[in-house]
Image (cartoon, rainbow, N blue to C red):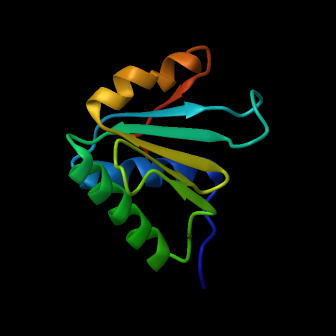
């Protein structure tokens, strides 16, 4: 029987899977109570467009095997900023230049950061 992940478990799972594919600067932001569109943002960096696509593909494959699929996706063709929307958690995979340009974490700088270490 498939176990349904809580939103926090999903966010941490996304972070750990990104880490497996050499994502760096992984950050989980707690958006509960701030916006009604998601509970968590998982933000990370891939060294280049090829790496961001590899990270996103790895996440899709691993979670699909666990019967969890994104409800939406964007940016996979370009690769500078890839977004995978799992409703309760949204993954953002940036190249270093795109992350610096968009500074997404600064837009949400007043929300708590979640510790990723728990598995």
Q: Is residue 119 visible?
A: no
Image location of residue 108, percent across then percent down? 59, 21
Q: Residue at x 35, y 41 (%)?
A: 80
- In the picture, measured across the screen, residue 45 lies left or right of residue 119, that is left
| Residue 84 coordinates in the image, percent (x, y) | 52, 54
Spot occupied by residue 40 in the image (x, y as percentages of width and height): 60, 40
Q: Classify 27 as above or below 70.
A: above
Considering every residue shown, the one lying at the far front of the view is: 78
Specify whether 117 is left or right of 30.
Answer: left
State which quarter of the image contains the N terminus.
bottom right
Please name the residue shown 45% across and 79% down the image: 65
The residue most toward the bottom is: 1
Q: Is residue 114 left or right of residue 51?
A: right
- Quick check: 83 above or below 3? above
Closest to the observer: 57 or 75?
75
| Picture coordinates of residue 36, whole percent (x, y) | 79, 38
State how many labels appear.
0
Residue plotted at (50% across, 25% down):
104
Identify which residue is drawn at 63% across, 63% down: 71
Any part of residue 94 in sight: yes
Instruction: Give 85 or 33, whichever is nearer the viewer.
Output: 85
30 w.r.t. 78: above or below: above
């Amino acid at each position: 029987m498939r176990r349904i992940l809580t939103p926090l478990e999903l966010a941490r799972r996304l972070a750990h899977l990104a880490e497996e594919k050499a994502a760096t600067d992984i950050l989980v932001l707690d958006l509960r109570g701030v916006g009604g569109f998601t509970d968590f943002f998982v933000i990370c960096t891939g060294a280049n467009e090829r790496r961001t696509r590899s990270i996103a593909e790895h996440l899709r494959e691993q979670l699909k095997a666990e019967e969890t699929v994104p409800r939406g996706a964007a940016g996979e063709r370009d690769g500078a900023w890839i977004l995978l929307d799992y409703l309760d958690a949204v993954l953002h995979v940036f190249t270093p230049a795109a992350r610096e340009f968009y500074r997404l974490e600064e837009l949400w700088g007043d929300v708590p950061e979640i510790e990723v270490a728990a598995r």
